[in-house]
Image (spheres, rainbow, N blue to C red):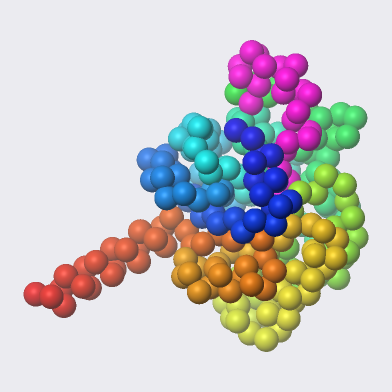
Amino acid sequence: MNGRLLKNKLREKKPCIGNWVTFADPTVTEVLCGAGYDFLVIDTEHAPLGIETVQLHLLAIKGEEAVPIVRVPWNDSVYLKRVLDTGAPGVMIPLVRNREETERAISFCLYPPEGIRGFGPRRAAGYDRRIPEYIEKANEEVLIILQIEHFETIENLEEILKVERLSAIFIGPWDLSGSLGLLGKINHPRVEGYIDTIIEKAHSANIPVGIAASSKAEDVVGWFKRGVQFVTAGTDYGLLSRGCDNSITSIKKSL
């Protein structure tokens, strides 16, 4: 699995659509892959997923068009190392607030001399079959995405965006609204204003910017029109719950 595929799409400014993986069963991931998403974010921050489950999801995605990204629980060198060693081509790191935290996060994902990632890639290197090739390409191909989800981060964003090897940033509207004392009011003018500022600063730095959105076409297309390059269009559980609700409501109305 190669993070370069998604990197290239973002570099070419192609709109990329993804979804969140939160269920433990990798069958769900196979279903999502069949829909034609550009990327899938395996969520270990809020979903009850362990490292073993992450690897099962990566196996389910192997050979598919979708690029898997693992959102880690926090900016931690050990967890990031384990996720990358399972073969994840990309990681998403939440709640990074300043340049120092950004530099630490990126160093955790890169082998020396550029970073401090310990060596033991296991599955990522084909179980010892592709070690030289993996060493040569790992730093270049890893996709490192930082989440921007606190108003304090925006004050430091210009410095954050200058850090080398940063692949992209991803806006978390819900936590951003919470940091402003407006939890859940993601369409509030203050929240919208901060989001526009993030997008503008990312464009100025030539760094791709993404955002979490609903699965509604008008919402996703709206974000692309505002300058966002990659969007998570809903969640696996959201698609399931709404699909069930719509189906049973329609059936009962027809009885």
In the picture shown, does residue 208 fall above or below 29? below
Please tell me which residue lies in front, 204 or 93.
204
Q: Residue 240, located in which quarter of the rendered image?
A: bottom left
Q: Is residue 146 visible?
A: no
Q: Position of residue 31 (x, y in %)?
A: 38, 45
Q: Residue at x 48, y 69 (%)?
A: 217
Most distant residue in the bottom direction: 189
Q: Residue 193, located in which quarter of the rendered image?
A: bottom right
Q: Which residues lie in the magenta part?
A: 124-146
Q: Is residue 12 left or right of residue 160?
A: left
Q: Is residue 247 left or right of residue 55?
A: left
Q: Residue at x 64, y 35 (%)?
A: 2
In the picture shown, does residue 208 fall above or below 246? above
Magenta stretch contains residue 243: no
Q: Position of residue 237 (x, y in %)?
A: 41, 58
Q: Position of residue 86 (x, y in %)?
A: 60, 30
Quadrant placement of the N terminus: top right
Magenta stretch contains residue 143: yes
Q: Is residue 118 left or right of residue 30?
A: right
Most distant residue in the top direction: 129
Q: Residue at x 35, y 66 (%)?
A: 242
Q: Residue 159, located in which quarter of the rendered image?
A: bottom right
